[in-house]
Every structure is written in C-alpha cells, then in structure tokens.
Image (cartoon, rainbow, N blue to C red):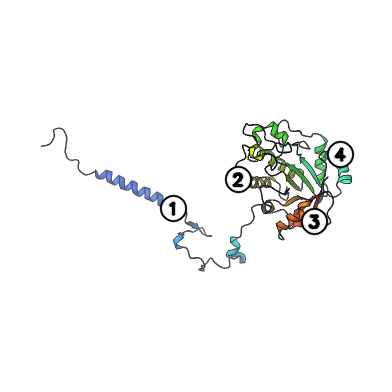
Amino acid sequence: MATKGYSSYHGRGSPGKIALIVVLVLILLGAITYLVVQNYLVYDESGQVHLELPFFKPKDGVDTEQSGDGPDGLTDADFDRVEPEFPHVKVSALHGVRLPDDCLWWGADYIMTKLAPEDMVLAVKRTTGGITYATEAQPPQGVVVETGRPLDCLKTLPAADRWTVGHIVCFSDNAFAQARTDCALVRADGGLWYDAAGQAWLDPTDPEVLRYLTALCRECGELGFNEVLLDNFCYPASGDTAAIANDDGDRAQILTDMAKTLRSSLPEGVALSVAYRGSGDLTLAQLADLFDRIYVPAADYDAVASQLGGQFDAATRLVSMTPQAAETGSYMLVQ
C-alpha cells in the first residue's frame, strides 16, 4: 500500500539531464585535447600548420628530409651551438696607472702629461664610499660627492686618445651602509656588521644596492670610459663572518646575476672587469666567463695564469696590479 502523499517510485533520470551531462563531458574533453595539441602544432616557412607528435618523431641517427645540409650550407651541428649570453669585449694589453683618488682636481693636462702618459685607471667610487665627481646615480644622503671641477676634468680624459678605466669599489662602503642600514650586512641585533679592517659592507641582494651600482656603471659608459673595473665584488672574507645575520642564499648565483645586470647596463663596446685577490665566492673560471679582464696582485699573477690555462689570453685579459711596470703582458701600476 502506497504511503499517502508520496510516491515510492523515483524512476530514471530525466533524458534532458543526461544529455546535458554528456555535452559537458564532451566540451571538457575537447578543451583538454585542444590545450595539449597546441604544444605540437608547428608552422613551416610557407605558413602551413603541421601536427608533430613526439611518438611519431624519427629516432636519433635516422636521416630525415631536414637533416644534412641546411640553408647557407649550415648543418644540424651549427644550429646546436649556443652563443654566450654576454660575449666578451675584445681588449688589448693594458699599460695603466691607478691614479690618486683626488687627481681630478688637478686638471686633465697635468694628469695626461705628468701622471699617466699611457692608459689610466680613475677612481669613481672610493673604498670609503665617496664618489669622485658630481654623479647623477643618486647616492643616499651622507655619501660624499665631489662637485665642480672634477666632472669637467672627467669629461675631458675619456675623450683623450688613451684607454680609460673607471674603478668602482662595490660592497665595502661605510658611507652608504651607515646612511642606509637596511641595505647593509647586519648582525643579529640589527646593528651594522664590520670586517676586520672596520669596513661595513652592503648587502649584494638588496635592490637599492643593485640600482645604485648599475647606475654608476651606466654613467661610466656614458661619460666615455672604455672599461669599468669592479673591486670588492664579493662577500667579506675577514672578520667574524659567521655573525652576519642576513647572509643567506647562493652567493655565487647572486654575484653572477648581478654581474650580468651590470654588464647589460654598459654601452656596447665598454669592457667589464673585476679585481681578484686570492679568494672569493666565484671561481676563476666563473670570473673568466663573466668578465673581460681579471686584475690580480703581482704576487698571484703566475699562479692565476696557470689555473686559467692556455685558452685564456693572459697577455690581454689578466692584469698585474704591481708597483713596477711588467716587461710583458698587462699591468696596472699601484702605489
């Protein structure tokens, strides 16, 4: 006996509902198929589209119509070559002098006739963090910036018929670090970290530090420098480095990425170099890949040249920082 007011038979689903479900499933399958197939659509030179599925591709070693000689006589091997992301700038042997930091006040004529008859290396950013001319790189307040005559002198020197190098001390920088502790390496208590020589260091991962160094490098190129030399382009090695609280991440990768950014900021043809003082976060092989020249203390020259090997052109790309002129190769006279 049926219950009053209710039906005990639910029956089959409505044909309309079943049809709707089937349509939705088909639409979903069609969308998935479309997204997958997009990865295997290939357009030839005439604009015709082809479907190339991976399981239909010929096995390695099997000749196809596209193997062998290609256009302009190129072979498959030629298309597999990868050009370096940042090709090196071709440099000649350097016979330079590292000029005094304040020499720009003395005038271009005096510098070229008395101090640097050949190539010259000029301080741009000092070890103290000060800038030797009226820069537009917007250093933080508290950084000493020379104004007036030095900029006029600096515009004259690169125009002379000699190689000019701008020397930038990168991360050891008391002035910047003290003005912007949020951009510096710090201790766990938030205070500035200092190395064994009493130098504070900037944080290589900080965006403002990257912006500032990039602006300085670009400015050097625009002023006419032939080369930019980065010094202290590394993490600190002296002092209680274990006490640095914000020293995390892959150091080598951080410095590699920054070197590539600085390289891309330079006008075409301006060389980018680095000073190496026996240790660092990048290997010599990595430095040789990233930079056009490597500057080393004279005492380390032979050992470094040996490690770099015969394929590295030490005569032009390895510079000895020495108090006396070398008979061969490249050198920078220092006091």
Nearest to viewer (mark 1 / mark 3): 3
Name the one closer to the observer, 295 or 11: 295
User: Which comes sooner in the sequence, label 1 or label 4?
Assistant: 1
Nearest to viewer (mark 3 / mark 2): 2
Q: How far apart are marks 1 and 4 (CA)?
A: 70 Å
| Residues at circles 1 and 3 in contact by the CB criterion of under 8 Å | no
Q: Which residue is drawn at 64% across and 37% down?
A: 243
For the N terminus, give its image quadrant. top left
Q: Mark 2 points at which residue?
A: 250
Q: Which mark is residue 106?
A: 4
Q: What residue type is labelled 3?
A: Gly
Q: How far apart are marks 1 and 3 (CA)?
A: 58 Å
Query: In this image, 108 relative to 290: left or right?
Result: right
Q: Residue 81 placed where, x, y %?
A: 61, 60
Query: In this image, 47 relative to 25: left or right?
Result: right
Q: In which quarter of the image is residue 303?
A: bottom right
Q: What residue type is labelled 1?
A: Val
Q: Is residue 330 above or below residue 13?
A: below
User: Which comes sooner in the sequence, label 4 or label 3?
Assistant: 4
Category of crowding for the residue at label 3, using alpha-carbon neighbours closer than 10 angstroms: few (below 14), some (14–19), many (at least 20)? some
Q: Mark 3 points at which residue?
A: 329
